[in-house]
Image (cartoon, rainbow, N blue to C red):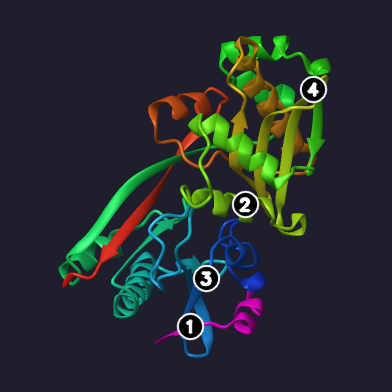
Amino acid sequence: MTIKKLDHREIQSIYDDFSFNFFTYPENLNQVFPKIDWWGYLKGEEIICIWPVPIGKNKAPLKGLPFTYYVGPIWKKPLPTLPEHRALYISKLVYGSFVEKFLQEYSSFRFEMPFNLIDIRPFLWLKSNFNNIKVEIKYSAIIEVGPFEVMSNKFRQVRRWELKKVPRSAYIIDYGKHNCDEVIKFYNTQSFMYDLTEEEYPIFKTLKNYLNLDANFGLHSISIREITSKELIGLALLGIFDTTMNIILNITRKQKKEDQILSTALHELIFKFAYINNIKLIDFNGANSEKLSDSKHSWGAIPILYFRIYITNQYE
């Protein structure tokens, strides 16, 4: 067993072998955050699990990853078909080795398990060796993609009513033509209702990095503008990897009475775009507050469980 840092060449050589998602794909993760420590668990000469750790300017793991999900252990695919006792033994060995190594390198770190990795018992058992382990139960909302007419059958009745009221002729729709500064200003005013600078609110830097990602690596956007003023009134920022689409940002103007229909218009565009692009699954990315969860499930999305885990050196 060996755990070591992986360089760019080693990461490139295993692109096709591991179960990446949009957020953990190395070309994306390396551009979104200032620095990534890539670690690998080697069984002999074979890397069987890798683990990226986003690092901040102070050389410590970042405490928050805005707009980003499921950054944690990434296993080689396909996952081996092993007897349950053997699979449990290997996961306990691998996770325990990573945690021990990380606490030698960092005083604390956090990570998230993708929703296809729900067995976190090894981390709970590690509490006997590392006392400061905190597990948060988190939820996202996912929806299977199909023809819009089929998907809309699962929408809440009010959503289907709103679809009939969407003034489509009043909108200009753009795909992949977002302006970074315009989007950040729009997000700022709609989310906070007063101007914040990038220095005052660092998540703007992360958002800017997402907006600047190359479309070849899965970054797409859908913009809605008023046909008369050309003003930006709605935007969805989407991350596509394989046949899964992650909704990174989904925001609409909220100042006017008629704006309540904008969210419905934007969701219709997202769903139709996903179907045309052969997407099988849409992940709304986070469904933890009561209000947002209700909104996301009103489109027929189902809840899905994942875990966020914090580990701190017990001697701090």
Find disc 4 in the rendering and name its residue. 229
* Crowd around label 1: few <14 · some 14–19 · many ≥20 (10 Å): few
Mark earlier in primary sequence (2, 3):
3
Secondary structure state at the residue bearing disc 4: loop
Which residue, given by chain and number where applicable, does mark 2 sit on? 208
Task: Please report the residue visible at 28 percent of the width from the left and 60 percent of the height from the top.
Answer: 121
Seen from the viewer's position, the closer of residues 147 and 102 is: 102
Kindly indicate whether the residue at mark 1 contacts the one at mark 3 (C-beta within 8 angstroms).
Answer: no
Element on which disc 1 rests: strand
Where 298 falls versus 276 (above or below)?
Answer: above
| Mark 4 vs mark 2, CA separation in Å | 25 Å
Q: Is residue 280 visible?
A: no
The amino acid at mark 4 is Ser
Q: Which residues are magenta?
A: 1-14
Image coords of residue 229 (percent x, y) = 79, 22
Q: Nearer the viewer, residue 222 or 187?
A: 187
The mark lying in front, picked from 2 and 3, is 2
Asked which secondary structure carries label 3, the reply is strand
Mark 1 lies on residue: 5
In reply to whether residue 5 is colored magenta, the answer given is yes
Count of picture labels: 4
Quote the CA–CA distance across marks 1 and 2. Answer: 28 Å
Query: Is residue 4 found left or right of 179 in the rendered image?
Result: left
Q: Residue at x 16, y 68 (%)?
A: 128
